[in-house]
Image: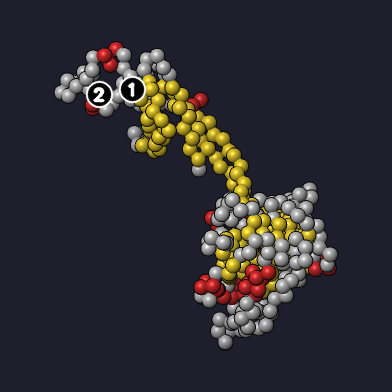
Amino acid sequence: MFKRFDPQDFLISTDSITAPVWSDTSSAFIPNVQEDGPQSTSDSGRYFRNALGPDGKVQFAVTYGHKDGSGSLFYFAGTPNLSPTKTVYGQFRNIIYGEDENADFNFGGYISKDFYAIVFNRARYRQALLPGSLNLAGIVSSEITDNSAISTVVDYFNCGRVYKLGSGSFGDGVMPPGAAFGVYGYLLPDIGTIIFNPAYGPTPNRGRDTDGGNPGTFLGQIGDFYMNFQESVTSNFAFVRARNAEFNYSCNPTFFRSGSGGTVLYPDLAQNPQVFITTVGLYNDSNELLAVAKLSKPIKKDFTKEALIRVKLDF
């Protein structure tokens, strides 16, 4: 038996979910990330280094970019300045600042030709990083966090929201002591990225046509690392209403007498049927099954009972 939904039978709800970005979400922080050895020696290791958690899964990648291509080997001897670090610099400049090929990385007034970046695994941060949840030790003498808790205005780059990094804990970051070098960097929550100002250790190896190993050096200094993600989960609720006179007979062939043309097998069930609802199917107007909801336990149904079943669809 089919029944068409009424408009009031549908409801849309949105919930916000937050949790640690790490693959082991029960851990609030990762104390010691490890470099992925095989990946670091592969061709991709020239561009970035993967960081593994205690469970051996990739949590994020660390990379280093330089405007002039320093800190990595040139692709070809006859084409100086073209190297992985130059490629990384151009890619991040385009993502963060847009199509302005002349844009430089500006860390709160300090113009830099290079940067470090932490890029979280897409599966780790889902929709976006959660501002105010960052707390990172090891890079500088103090802990690093963003300024989302004390900022009254949200700034934007081409890539979305941007928060400044400074000294503090969980969102109360303030300008570092060496203000002449600007801020520690930026939290870019909408692309799951943290950009670091190399003016604050570790000092990069900026040798020309040299494999400086800068991503690995930066990764090796990361200490206790707190970071959460935030995700908006939209749910569609469909309220399936089985009124007292509805859904009291089964479509199962065993409910009817074989070859009788629809006679109920047991006469007592003709006037007092008793069936059990176990499954709800949602169909479109073309009679195509779109979704199936299984009940945790069967619901007994007869003419004296009504049932209201709430079906939740998350996406």
Give coordinates of residue 229: x percent, y percent.
62, 51
Asked if residue 283 lies left or right of residue 207, the reply is: left
Give SS at disc 1.
strand
Q: Which residue does the image show at 43% across and 19% down from the upper left?
A: 306
Q: Mark 1 points at which residue?
A: 275
Residue placed most toward the observer, 315 or 103: 315
Give coordinates of residue 78: x percent, y percent.
57, 87
Q: Which residue does the image show at 55% across and 84% down from the upper left?
A: 76
Asked if residue 238 lies left or right of residue 161, the reply is: left
Is the Cβ of the residue at disc 2 closer than 8 Å to that at disc 1? yes
Q: Name the residue under label 2.
A: 255
Give coordinates of residue 246: x percent, y percent.
37, 19
| Disc 1 residue type (three-letter) | Val
Reading the chain from its start, which is encountered first: label 2 or label 1? 2
Tag 1: Cα neighbours inside 10 Å, few (<14), some, or many (≥20)? some
| Residue at the top extreme, as displayed | 271
Q: Is residue 256 visible?
A: yes
